[in-house]
Every structure is written in structure tokens, then in C-alpha cells.
Amino acid sequence: MDLTEMFAERTARMKASEIRELLKLLDQPGIISFAGGIPDPALFPSDAFARAFAQTMEGDQAGSALQYSVSEGYLPLREWLVGEMAKVGVPCSVDNILITSGSQQALDYLGKLFLSPGDTALVNWPTYMGALGAFNPYEPRYDQLSINGNRSADDFKDSAKAETGGRVKFAYLSSDFSNPTGETVDRRGRESLLDLADDLDCAVIEDAAYQALRYDGEDIPPILALEIARKGNLEACRTIYCGSFSKTLSPGLRVGWIVAAKPVISQLVLMKQASDLHSPTLNQIAINAVARACFEDHVSGVRKAYRGRRDAMLAALERYMPNGVEWTRPEGGMFVWLTLPVGVDGADLLALALETQKVAFVPGHAFFADGSGRNTIRLSFSCADEATIEEGMRRLGLALRAAIG
Ligand SMILES: Cc1ncc(COP(=O)(O)O)c(C=O)c1O
């Protein structure tokens, strides 16, 4: 008997990422790793969560916290989010918000909502690997999202039709301090993207997972805020905003949210009912309590810690990188993206760096929907202290010099 023969066609595109498999091997003593794109657990507000969970379980709320609940999400949390969204220029009501199990679930639902096989999703080259993983089972074709590029809407439409007979359904992007490059789309780029989406008549999926983690420079309004300013109100907007508490409070509790026009939210609520009924109530209650008690203070501490690590990494890159290596200078988030001299392969470099220098990072090509970008790598500065970053960059410099020859 071979059950695998009976798996649906969509599973053909659900492959284990070779990178993720490789990263499992990195948890060995002596290795300095800049591979995992995760928050530093030392920065989690553990005491505040301990109090929130204890108070919920000891109080009158225990029964409802352990009971089934509404698919839309815990109302007081959605009410708090209404206030937060208003602060960034997105006036909305609780009916515009769906709580999800992390923004990863939002990406899965949005793929399910929009993509029929052969439809086109516009994504950056490179883009968040997890977004490709979320969209792949819906069998899309990908095209390169080039903001301010020289391709017209008709060009995107024609190639979607010619290649797979589908249409462009959405543009997906991580607007601030993206994973993997750390880059931010400036205001002009956001306005051009909205022009393109209007011409294409497609949705915009704005992944705001890192938006709260700005270390310097001016805040740029979310794409959704710019669209509301153009069109008067959220109900007229094509942008769908995906937020997350993973990078600010805790990824383990799996709480994120979607903000969109009501017809979009209503359909997503049906999807959530069919998928997991609702996100864990207890976690939503705890996030709500901690967010109300200390969100701004806590996040400003997180920013301070990561800013120091970002600065340490940029300074060490200046010191140790050989000629011909270029890198981004992110104003926030967790990542720096390196472009290596042509011909230096990021995956080969990882093998060499692990063996000879015991330093790890993520080869960049897994972030490209077309499999290109072999001479790129992603470094994460979120989990290492400044001294480790200095030593790690020194080792990376040695590995690179050996690779370049
Ligand atoms: C750009 C981006 N979007 C979404 C996610 C998913 O995060 P979560 O599901 O924890 O909210 C991540 C996680 O690393 C990410 O980097």
C-alpha cells in the first residue's frame, strides 16, 4: 500500500525546504548562527504573560477562556487593535478585523481566498519564503513585483494570460524591513504600487510583520493607510493588512490579525470556521492583557536591544567583508541581506563556513520564486549579542575570502 500515491495534486508543490532541513543541523555547540529569523526569547515579556495567564485562570473568566469562542476573535483584543490601527492612519471598526493564528495563517487564508490554479501572484524577488510556502498549495504562477519598474499593467496581465490562462489576483509584499532583505518600500513606492494595483484591478497583501520594529528614520504610513487617504474609507480599499504579535510580544502564542474591507473579512471568517473555528481564546486574552498593560514600553525596549545588534552587525560588516560584497542597511526588523560576487554560491559558502569557521546563515536562493539569487545570503542579528556578532562577522569574512579565492 502506498498512500503517498493518493495525495492530491496540490501536495506536489509542498516541498520541505532544503534550507529548513539544513538549519536543523545548526543547533550544535560552537556554531555561531545568524540563520534563524526569530525573536530573542530573552526579550519576551514573560512576567507580564505569567500574570495574565494566572489572572485569567484564577478569575471568573476561566470558563470562557477555556470554552469555544467566536471565529472573528476576542472582542477586547479587536477593540484594542482598532485603537492601534487608528494611530497608523487606518480608521476601522472591529468588523474589519479578524484574529488569526499568526500572520502565517493569514497568508494561507489569503492564498485560499484568491488563488485558483494558474492565477498569478506578484511577489518580490526575493520574498518571504513562508509566503511562497503558504501560496504554493493553491498552485499559482509567480511574477516579479517590480515597483517603479518599467512594466505596464497590460504587460503583467498579458503574461499572466499567455502563460497559464489566469489573471493577476494580488501583489504580496512585506512593506517594512522585509524578510529577507531588511529593505523598506518608501512612500513613493507604496503610491506606485497602489497605482499598479488599481490598473491591474488586483488586491494588495501588505505583510506588516516587522512594522513596529523601526530603529531610525521616519515612519512611513502603511499601504492601507495611503489607500484609505486616496479612497476615503477602508470599504473602498483593495489592500489587506496582515499584522502579527510574533515579533513584538511572542511568536509561540500564535496571534496575528487581518484588517480589510468587511466583505473580505466575512469570507475569511467562513474560512476560519472551516479551518480551526477560532484562534486559542486563552492566548488572545493573554495578548490583550499584556498589550494593554505594556505594549509601547515593551516594544521600545525590544527596539533598543535590536538597534544595538543591527549597528554592531553593520559596523562589523564594514570591518570584515572583502571587496565585492554588498549589503543592505535596514532601518528596522531583523535582517541584513548580502549580495556576494557573481559566481560565489550562498549554499556552497554555508557548507564551507560551517566546516571551517563554524558560522551559519541562510543562503538566499530559497527566497526567490524563480530559484535565482544564488549569490545572496541572509543574516539575522536578532538573537546574538554584540560581541558574538563581531566574532561571527570576522569568521564570515574569513570564509568569504576563502570562497572568493
Ligand atoms: C515577513 C513575515 N511574514 C509573516 C511571518 C509569519 O509570522 P507569524 O505567523 O508568527 O505572525 C514571518 C515570520 O517570520 C515573516 O517573516
Image (tube, helix red, strand yellow):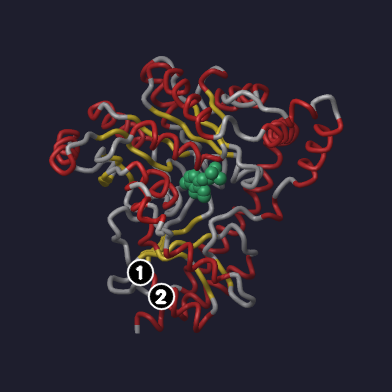
* Disc 2 packing (10 Å; few <14; some 14–19; many ≥20): many
The kind of residue tagged 2 is Leu
Report helix, strand or loop for mark 1.
Answer: loop
Residue at the image position 45 percent from the left and 24 percent from the top: 260
- Mark 2–mark 1 Cα distance, whole angstroms, equals 10 Å
State left or right for residue 261 relative to residue 340.
Answer: right
State left or right for residue 334 relative to residue 165.
Answer: right
In this rendering, the answer to whether 243 lies above or below 325 is: above
The picture quadrant where one finds residue 64 is: top right
In this rendering, the answer to whether 238 lies above or below 117 is: above
Disc assigned to residue 340: 1
Residue 331 visible in the current orientation: no
Looking at this view, is 269 or 156 the one in front? 269
Looking at this view, is 154 or 9 the one in front? 9
**Is the residue marked 1 within 8 Å of ligand 1, measured from its CB?**
no
In this rendering, the answer to whether 314 lies above or below 398 is: above
**Is the residue marked 2 within 8 Å of ligand 1, measured from its CB?**
no
Disc assigned to residue 45: none
> How far across and how far down the image is residue 4, in percent?
39, 56
Q: Earlier in the sequence, mark 2 or mark 1?
A: 1
> How far across and how far down the image is residue 211, in percent?
52, 40
CB under 8 Å between callouts 2 and 1?
Answer: yes
> How far across and how far down the image is residue 371, in percent?
30, 59
The quadrant of the rendering that contains the C terminus is bottom left
Residue 373 visible in the current orientation: yes
- Check disc 2 and report the residue beneath it: 349
Report helix, strand or loop for mark 2.
Answer: helix
> How far across and how far down the image is residue 126, in percent?
35, 53
The kind of residue tagged 1 is Leu
